[in-house]
Amino acid sequence: MAMKKWTAALVTSAVTASLVAGCGGGGDASGDSGKKGEAQNSNLNATGFPIVKEPIKLTFFTGKAATTANNWNETVIWKEYAKMTNINVDFQLVPFDNLTEKRNLSLASGDYPDAFHTTRMTNTDLVKYGSQGTFIKLNDLIDKYAPNLKKILDADPSIRKGITMADGNIYAFPLIYDQQFTSALLGAKLWYKKDWLDALGMKEPTTLDEFYEYLKAVKNTDLNKNGKADEIGYGGVGYADLLNKLKGSFGLMNRGTAQPNVDMDPKTNELRFVPTAPEYKEMLQYVNKLTKEGLIEKEITTIKSNQFYAKGAEGVYGSMVTTSPYTLMKQTTYVGMPMLKGPNGQDKFTAIRSPLVQTGAFVITDKNKNPEATVRWMDYFYSEEGNKMFFMGIKDQSYTETADGKVQYTDEITKNPQGLTLEQAVVKYVTWPGGSYPGIVRQKFFAGAEALPESIEAAKKVEPNLIKDIWPPFSFTDAENEKLITLQNDIHTYVTEMETKFITGTIPFTEWDNYVATIKKMGVDEYLKIYKAGYDRYKK
């Protein structure tokens, strides 16, 4: 089969792409196209299945996680859904590793597909391509053809506010986590190895000092009894996950993870740039101590995810941040860490997402001749039945259902004869492993890592300490975005570089004031001013 035009466009040079940037604006497929758009859709059934009377074909540019199915066109759920809907989707998979580059080239070339699915569009992307008309407005289409999403937006106006851009338009279907599903809102958790803690005769850590003592004991004890000093206090991929879990212990990121670098300063009640706060320095000093004493994985800045999982499967880590030691490493003795109280008594758990996890999970382009049908295709997965299908697959093939409506995967998935993990076995049927998909995650149907008993238990431990006021991502105008992108690129890159240098000791903490002064020179006041505009719009 010949490669799609838009796929071929991905290999065009960046120079050519830049010459045609901004093409494809303002088609009739917009949600405000009125009678003309409806006339083009005489093939559409307004409700029920199939969605269209005569079959149609759509092409989706689709982000691919390493853990999801390799060919979505052959995955059971999408073959079955094509039969139900009369809509045949050609999923063109692009690995997350080079997703942004290929996505941008596709858009710049003017040869892009009917929709972008699981492609992590930022609010900046939505405003930019939405204002050009490349991404169609969905306000009216959602009202008319997306009853399931509309019901969620009506029930939680903060989500509607979060997906509405500064120009008043909605350009994307979001990824939402049900507010009741705390474990999913927490995502990856900080775990410790309980059998090692018991062997050491220690009690569960509840403070940063106790956590430090546990890591030290792990490093200095042959807990796996192999005669080697191979026990590692903490393991992970990069420092970011650990820092996010420790921020609450220092009173940082106190409005959740949607804006990790901006929160509310409790002293002034004004927006604060988190990485220059004195408490941030304290946190880096704590992690510097752990690093200096060899309590953290030595290769933490270079280790890849698959290497981390392989090492974790050997059972050498005393603690780690990950979604599930069980599903990813077949480790059964890890339990969730409680809230670790900080040096000044801070005990609010702040590493929690907004229920609006991703704004730009699915967008429809102006190339799409069937926007109404595409909206209906997408909306089904916000319903109970669609949610069940998306996560569980097909009844009596990948899951069974009891008379009272409880669902569970078949033994082929939970006790795979080839020894595959749950996430490896399930991708024959469904495509949710790896995340970033559009839809809603409900505990009732989600059988991934966050729904495991140990994950639910880990979430319960920190529930009493959870912050209540959680911000969604803010939306900015095109002009604000233009300024913010430049400021963020420079400031965030510098912060990340310096963070690692402070932690590893390459740069001493005597340089902290110079670091803060440099960030000020880079325009952090202007950065905060733009965030304030986004915050004010959100509060309205």
Image (spheres, rainbow, N blue to C red):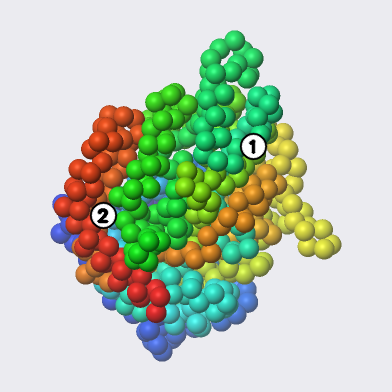
| The quarter of the displayed image where residue 137 is located | bottom left
- The amino acid marked with disc number 2 is Gln
Residue drawn at x 53%, y 15% is 229
Q: In the picture provided, is 467 more to the left or to the right than 203?
A: left
Disc 1 is placed on an element classified as: loop
Are there few (<14), some (14-19), or many (20+) residues within 10 Å of tag 1?
some
Q: Nearer the viewer, residue 485 or 411?
A: 485
Disc 2 is placed on an element classified as: helix
Residue 204: image tag: 1
State which tag comes first along the sequence, 1 or 2. 1
Residue drawn at x 25%, y 66% is 529
Q: Is residue 174 above or below residue 151?
A: above
Residue drawn at x 64%, y 14% is 225
Q: Nearer the viewer, residue 218 or 71?
A: 218
Q: Determine which residue is flagged by label 2.
A: 488
Percent across and percent down for residue 169 are: 37, 77
Percent across and percent down for residue 334 are: 64, 35
